[in-house]
Image: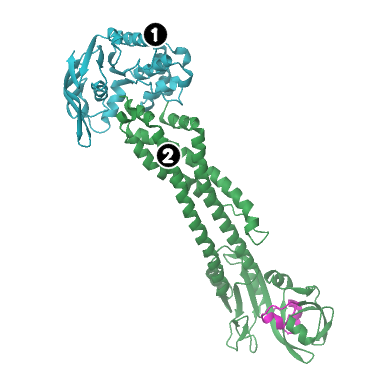
Chain colours: A cyan, B green
Amino acid sequence: MSLINIINLKKQYSSGNDTVEALRGLDIAIEKSEFITIMGQSGSGKSTLLSVLGGLNHPSAGEVEMAGVKLYQLPGEKLADFRAQNLGFVFQSFHLIPYLTAIENVMLPLAIVKMSTPAKKIAARQALEQVGLGGKQDRLPNQLSGGEQERVAIARAIVNNPQILLADEPTGNLDSKTSEEVMALFRELNDAGQTVVMVTHNPDNGRYADRTIHLCDGMVVNA
Amino acid sequence: MKLHNISINNLKRRKAKMAFLTVGLMVGIATIVTLLTLTRSMSSDIERKMDEFGANILVTPQSNGLSMNYGGISLGGVTFDQREIKESDLALIKTIANHKNISTIAPKVLGGVKIGTHDVLLVGVNFDSELKMKQWWQVFGDAPKADNEVLLGSDASRILNATPGDSIIIKDETFKVAGVLGQTGSQDDALVFAGLRKAQKLLGKEGRITLAEVAALCSGCPIGDMVTQIAEKLPDARVSAIQQVVEGRLKALDQFKHFSYAMAGVVVFIGSLIVFVTMMGSVNERTTEIGVFRAIGFRKSHIMRIILLEATIVSLLAGFLGYAAGMGGAKLALPLMAESRNAHLIWESTVAFGSIGLALVLGLLASLYPALHASKMDPTEALRAL
């Protein structure tokens, strides 16, 4: 059984009398330890797909099943708990918390986990070392370069050992050299068994992935 | 890393906002503390002065005889067939439960005497307590110090044609007029005041007094209870409260309280509004941040805890600072506002804890909606990109 099963997924947005169909009945299966890139033009529905996959955006119809759990059938705040335990997010603009140091940003997902502070620090240090930022743990985001901020964001996403890593345009704000370094890092994580689902504009990023899903007007055009 | 670290770090980073929020709430709390403390201190000062300026409890003998009027208050049988109170019984007044509230006991012995061709009312008083109680008296000359000295009311001085330094004869004894009272417009103008011992001797009433005026020094003290307590100690005496004084005091107090409560209400509203607007602004400014929190698995309750913890920290700080600033303001303003130079600032733990508690309640209430708003933010909207 696949780690992620997307079944007839639809998402509509209403604005006044207008209805926009962002996703039009997607069926996608993603295996454990797979590295998937989702590509498509602006408005193709890739970011909507990622937000629905991340449990942040209720679909209009269809089902998302992750690790045997029907995501949108989880009651109340159980969906938030599921995100905390199973998903890691890497955002396009990094979205690091500006008043927290690198290590504090990485520890953020652990703030709601019952763990001793020393254990949290050890986990955060390990995550930072994994992304090659062991020596910069006490720096604030504005004291780090774009590439370093991206690495901190990746460390934050993996610190709680999530089953699935979701990334939205992680190289969108980086130069080509740093982009390659970041993509290599994702590849390393994937090689270590991490499932990665990444939305990207950049066709070059596709070569790091096991598979690329192309979206057009809310539908899969080839997988 | 725990939730409180996020709150504390955010406050540290947004120092200017935090300072604005703290100052906004602090000013509100400080104003309330200043108003309350000033009101209480001034009320206490007024009460003290009112206590000093006259008796509020009168002890007179039980009597079936004819009544005599003293300052509009009926004194039991002071003219004929009068029964006096034993002077030694006055000590019992100081044994009542509320004895600490008693400021002054002014015993008096009254009796008619002939001076020259005039019949006058001689009043034996303890000049120390009498002068303390009747601070409005203006004495021209000196207050009597020796046994053979008297103090004349202004009318008595005019009718007896005696001024300070003159001598008058009462029952074959010569007395020096030490001083003359300025016009008071009361019965005091027609009286001749002598020392208590001497008057008792002249009137043949050694060890007895006709009445005693008691000044109770208290802040809204139970005059009624004190009257009952004194009456229990002195069963042969009639003890009554001078209602005008009590009612006047209560009215003055009420006016002060109403004013301060109205002002406090306005300030509380403004303070709450400042907290609400600032917290709401802060939440809107942190939309992305809250989106990140939600995306990485924070529950709505976690978001609320972060926001409310920030409000708690700021409110507590504002409460402490507001109390300190308020008391400082009251200390500075009291000499300007109180009529007496001896007005004392009243330090009360209830005001201290109350102001901190009020700051906390205000801060939390005003932050509740912003916190709820933050917790309900759509993470997708918040992050926009996702």
The image position of residue B297, as x and y in percent, is 32, 27
Q: Work out whether B346 lies above or below B168.
A: above
Residue B118, can we see it? yes
Disc 2 marks a residue whose amino acid type is Met
Residue A139, can we see it? no
Disc 1 marks a residue whose amino acid type is Lys
Left or right of B295? Residue A129 is right
Circle 1: element type: helix
Q: Is residue B185 magenta?
A: yes
Circle 2: element type: helix
Left or right of B367? Residue B83 is right
Highlighted magenta segment, given as a residue range:
B181-207
Judging by the rendered image, the residue that carries numbered circle 1 is A177
The image position of residue A180, as x and y in percent, is 36, 8
Give B70 or B265, whichever is nearer the viewer: B265
Determine crowd level at label 1: few under 14, some 14-19, many 20+ residues with C-alpha closer than 10 A.
Answer: few
Give B289 or B299, whichever is nearer the viewer: B289
Quarter of the rendering occupied by the C terminus of chain B: top left
Q: Work out whether B63 lies above or below B19.
A: below
Specify the farthest residue to the bottom.
B117
Specify the quadrant of the image occupied by residue A108: top left
Give A181 or A71, whichever is nearer the viewer: A181
Q: Is residue B101 magenta?
A: no
Judging by the rendered image, the residue that carries numbered circle 2 is B279
Q: Residue at x 84, y 82 (%)?
A: B167
Chain under disc 1? A
Specify the quadrant of the image occupied by residue A86: top left
Tag 2 near tag 1, CB within 8 Å:
no
Quarter of the rendering occupied by the N terminus of chain B: top left
Left or right of A174? Residue A68 is left
Determine crowd level at label 2: few under 14, some 14-19, many 20+ residues with C-alpha closer than 10 A.
Answer: many
